[in-house]
Image (cartoon, rainbow, N blue to C red):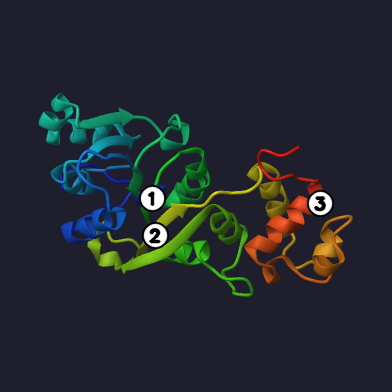
């Protein structure tokens, strides 16, 4: 590591195991020449693996010290155009189209990053997040971890926990383990903005029955609580409450 000061209270921990970085790149599954967006490259352990495989990498890094480190460490790749480092907060980075998205996500903005991903077009994303967050991403109805996040992710992606990563593989060592999660985009049949408002409202009052949360709630959902219905049922509920039509139809 290059003597860069890390801010753990902002979620800045760095992967220090090359084998884990290789596993992430393997999970992404893209060949040479593919264009990958890397979120938060840090000091570049994953970046190096991606570049070695011949991938074109756009690396978005908000921390100016780490941005400078990436430019210095991979100068020849920057000069050749294979690596394009961008000094910017990913949450403000312009959405675009990539073959894949990958990154070890800062803890403090994980949720915001995940909710931004649908703005991009890509074949697969592979992200490393806190284990507890990953478990909420893939939680099933009726489970303790089932939440707005679970529903939103399930309606947009086929999500899977690929590997649990022990905290010992990071510096400084965090208090929790992490997990590698793969996300494959799903085609959503309606405009998700209105659906998201229904999901958010429902889980803001998750102990109440849906009939007490929404006026005009369909009878089959009225006696159920938000954590008792599936993502597909949420889509149906939102469509009936808001009058949404499938994409491309009036």
Q: Earlier in the sequence, mark 2 or mark 3?
A: 2
Q: Is residue 229 above or below residue 45?
A: below
Left or right of 145? Residue 131 is left
Tell which of 14 and 203 is nearer to you.
203
| Residue most extreme to the left | 76
Residue 235 appears anywhere in the view: yes
Considering the numbered disc 2 on the image, is that residue within a helix, a strand or a loop? Answer: strand
Q: Earlier in the sequence, mark 2 or mark 1?
A: 1
Left or right of 108? Residue 102 is left
Write down the residue under mark 3.
241
Residue 204 appears anywhere in the view: no
The answer to whether the residue labelled 1 contacts the one labelled 3, judged by CB atoms less than 8 Å apart, is no
Write down the residue under mark 1.
125
Quarter of the rendering containing residue 179: bottom left
User: In the image, what residue occupies the spot 27% across and 56% down?
Assistant: 24
Write down the residue under mark 2.
181
User: In the image, what residue occupies the spot 66% across and 38% down?
Assistant: 248
Q: Earlier in the sequence, mark 1 or mark 3?
A: 1
Residue 167 position, x and y percent, is 30, 65
Q: How far separated are the C-alphas under marks 2 and 1?
A: 8 Å
Q: How far separated are the C-alphas under marks 1 and 3?
A: 32 Å
Considering the numbered disc 1 on the image, is that residue within a helix, a strand or a loop? Answer: strand
Left or right of 247? Residue 86 is left
Residue 141 position, x and y percent, is 62, 71
**Disc 2 vs disc 3: which is toward the camera?**
3
């Amino acid at each position: 590591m290059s003597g860069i000061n890390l801010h753990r209270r902002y979620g800045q921990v760095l992967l220090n195991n090359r084998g884990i970085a290789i596993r992430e790149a393997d999970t992404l599954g893209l060949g040479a020449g593919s264009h990958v967006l890397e979120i938060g490259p840090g000091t570049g352990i994953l970046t190096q693996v991606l570049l070695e495989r011949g991938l074109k990498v756009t690396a978005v890094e908000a921390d100016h010290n780490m941005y400078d480190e990436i430019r210095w460490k991979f100068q020849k790749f920057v000069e050749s155009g294979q690596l394009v480092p961008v000094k910017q907060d990913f949450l403000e980075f312009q959405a675009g189209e990539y073959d894949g998205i990958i990154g070890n996500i800062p803890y403090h903005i994980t949720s915001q990053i995940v909710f931004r991903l649908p703005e991009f077009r890509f074949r697969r994303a592979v992200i490393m997040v806190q284990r507890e967050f990953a478990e909420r991403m893939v939680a099933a109805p009726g489970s303790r971890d089932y939440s707005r996040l679970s529903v939103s992710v399930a309606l947009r992606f086929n999500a899977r926990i690929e590997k649990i990563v022990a905290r010992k593989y990071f510096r400084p060592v965090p208090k929790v383990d992490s997990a590698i999660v793969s996300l494959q985009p799903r085609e959503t049949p309606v405009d998700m903005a209105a659906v998201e408002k229904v999901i958010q409202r429902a889980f803001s009052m998750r102990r109440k029955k849906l009939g007490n949360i929404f006026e005009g709630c369909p009878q089959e959902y009225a006696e159920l609580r938000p954590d008792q219905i599936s993502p597909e049922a949420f889509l149906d509920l939102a469509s009936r409450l808001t009058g949404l039509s499938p994409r491309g139809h009036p």
